[in-house]
Amino acid sequence: MSTWISERGARRGVTCAALLLALPACLAPVTPQAPLTEAALGNGAVRLSAPRGYCIDADSQRRLPGGGAFVLLAPCTHLTGTPGVSAAPALMTVSVMPQAAGAPAPDARSLAAAVAPAPVRGEGQEAGLVYAQVMRGGEAVLPGGDPRHWRGARVVAGQLASLALYVPQGSTLTGREGRLLLGDLAAGLSAAAPVGAAPAKPAVATAPPPSAATPRRGVFARLFPVSN
């Protein structure tokens, strides 16, 4: 998506941000803008640094009920309309929501429950990021896109962050490359230290003991739309 100056363009920007419409339409360069690679989310509690070659669409930033936030990322070349670092076509989303005190950290089981009934595979956890490949529903978000897409979640600065990666049909990002890009996106999330204060040590969330109970969707699930 780009930053659109005209009224018509602004409407298209809102539509793409809200509904995540077709990748080619959202990524088409319209009005060049300065690259935006960092943004504050979650009422300033979380700082997002975009992966190399990708930029944040300023027009896409939205506040969510309950103190949350939402933002889109896409290749900088599409957003700025100028040559730059080459990046594979992709649309990424980041949503953050305050994590309730004592809430368990996200795990593969709760992630699968959040996107049910869509099947998942390739679940894992690395550097605090829980991730999985969702096997259907991507084409509903991006018409003409690949059904397979990546979802992930991690806790940062008391906020539950959910990540998603959508790509065109047949993109190499549907495989390991996509998982690595999702990891880069997650690695770009950090606690924003108060002005004049030393950076706070990140909180370590403790997962609950194993249970046979059905996972509760709760706030974690609200960050993820149900895949078709």
Image (spheres, grey):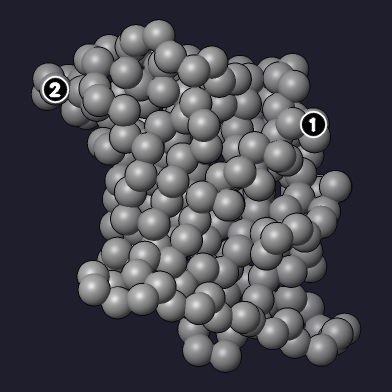
- Residue 116 position in % (x across, y down): 73, 57
- Residue at horizontal 27 percent and vertical 12 percent from the top: 30
- Residue at horizontal 44 percent and vertical 35 percent from the top: 73
Relative height, residue 180 to residue 81 (above, below): below
- Residue 162 position in % (x across, y down): 55, 57
Relative height, residue 184 to residue 108 (above, below): above
Amino acid residing under circle 2: Ile
- Specify the quadrant that holds the N terminus: top left
- Residue 69 position in % (x across, y down): 36, 58
Q: Secondary structure at mark 2?
A: loop
Quadrant for residue 2, please give it.
top left
Q: Which residue is mark 1?
A: 175
Q: Secondary structure at mark 1?
A: loop
Residue 16 relative to residue 130: left or right: left
Q: Which residue is mark 2?
A: 5
Q: Nearer the viewer, residue 220 or 199?
A: 199
Q: Nearer the viewer, residue 46 or 220?
A: 46
| First along the sequence among labels 2 and 1 | 2
Give neighbour class at mark 1: few <14, some 14-19, many 20+ (Cα, 10 Å).
Answer: some
Q: How many marks?
A: 2
- Specify the quadrant that holds the C terminus: top right
- Residue at horizontal 85 percent and vertical 85 percent from the top: 210
- Residue at horizontal 40 percent and vertical 9 percent from the top: 83
Relative height, residue 106 to residue 182 (above, below): below
Residue 118 relative to residue 38: left or right: right
Q: Nearer the viewer, residue 36 or 122?
A: 36
**Which circle marks residue 151 in the picture?**
none
Q: Real-space Cα distance between discs 2 and 1?
A: 36 Å
- Residue 24 position in % (x across, y down): 47, 15
Q: Nearer the viewer, residue 190 or 219?
A: 190
Quadrant for residue 207, please give it.
bottom right
Amino acid residing under circle 1: Gly
